[in-house]
Image: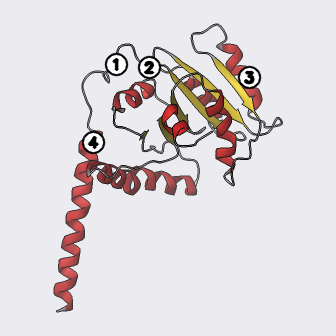
Amino acid sequence: MLPTVLSLLAGFFLVIHLATLLIAWWRCRPRRGDAALAVPAPAVTVVRPLCGLETFSARTIAAAFALDYPAYELLFCVARADDPVIPLVEEAIAAHAEGPVPARLLVGDDRIGANPKLNNMVKGWRHAAFDRIAFIDSNVLVPPRFLRDLVATFRPDTAVVSAPPCGIEPAGFGADLECAFLNTHEARWQYTVDTFGQGFAQGKTLFYRKGDLDRSGMR
């Protein structure tokens, strides 16, 4: 009896495993053409919370200025005035001062709760010039079409758009494990629950309409 039960369980989990792999493959399959944008495309505020120097800080900050999108602003948020990442941000803003992307550095720690990241981010929310706001973590290396994909995914009945992160260029055993988890189990289960209409939201990337959260009490 026990071997039969174990065989049935193994078969069941194998089917689930293969099904989630198939769903992830389908959701990640290459698509032809660019993401369709509404005309005119809505302007977007990109908020990037920063804290300390990371291995690829210079690259991730520079990539934020190179997004292929018609109109957006950048707000870099830092909690402490002595944070070592500030010179990198100021250098990047100065280097792109004549470019089409307005950028600002916001410094301060607004204690709205117990979460340090939210306390750092909220000033970006308050200073946003546009109704569409994308919160993107400091260690996310955004590809040029990132905002296009976020905006194209946003439908009239959408509350928030999120994006599973892909781990690349790990340095060390711990980072290897994190990348292995992000790129396999986490991503395919997120795609699976989203495919069945449950959705997910992961803090690496969160894309909102400012008005929606303002009406719900966010200030």
Q: Amino acid at mark 2?
A: Pro
The nearer-to-camera label among 4 and 2 is 2
Q: Residue at x 22, y 58 (%)?
A: 18
Instruction: Report the disc number at residue 27.
Output: 4
Callout 1–callout 2 Cβ contact below 8 Å: yes
Q: Amino acid at mark 4?
A: Arg
Q: Position of residue 73 (x, y in %)?
A: 58, 20
Q: Earlier in the sequence, mark 3 or mark 2?
A: 2
Judged left or right of residue 120, residue 41 is left
Element under label 1?
loop
Element under label 2?
loop
The residue indicated by pointer 3 is: 90
- The one nearer the camera, 122 or 215, is 215
Q: Residue at x 36, y 52 (%)?
A: 190
Q: Position of residue 200 (x, y in %)?
A: 40, 50
The nearer-to-camera label among 3 and 1 is 1
CA distance for labels 4 and 2 = 25 Å
Judged left or right of residue 65, residue 209 is left
Q: Amino acid at mark 1?
A: Ala
Question: Looking at the image, how many numbered discs can be counted on the residues?
Answer: 4
The residue indicated by pointer 2 is: 42
CA distance for labels 3 and 1 = 33 Å
Element under label 4?
helix
Judged left or right of residue 170, residue 164 is left
CA distance for labels 4 and 3 = 38 Å
Looking at the image, is 176 positioned above or below residue 9? above
CA distance for labels 1 and 4 = 22 Å
Q: Earlier in the sequence, mark 1 or mark 4?
A: 4
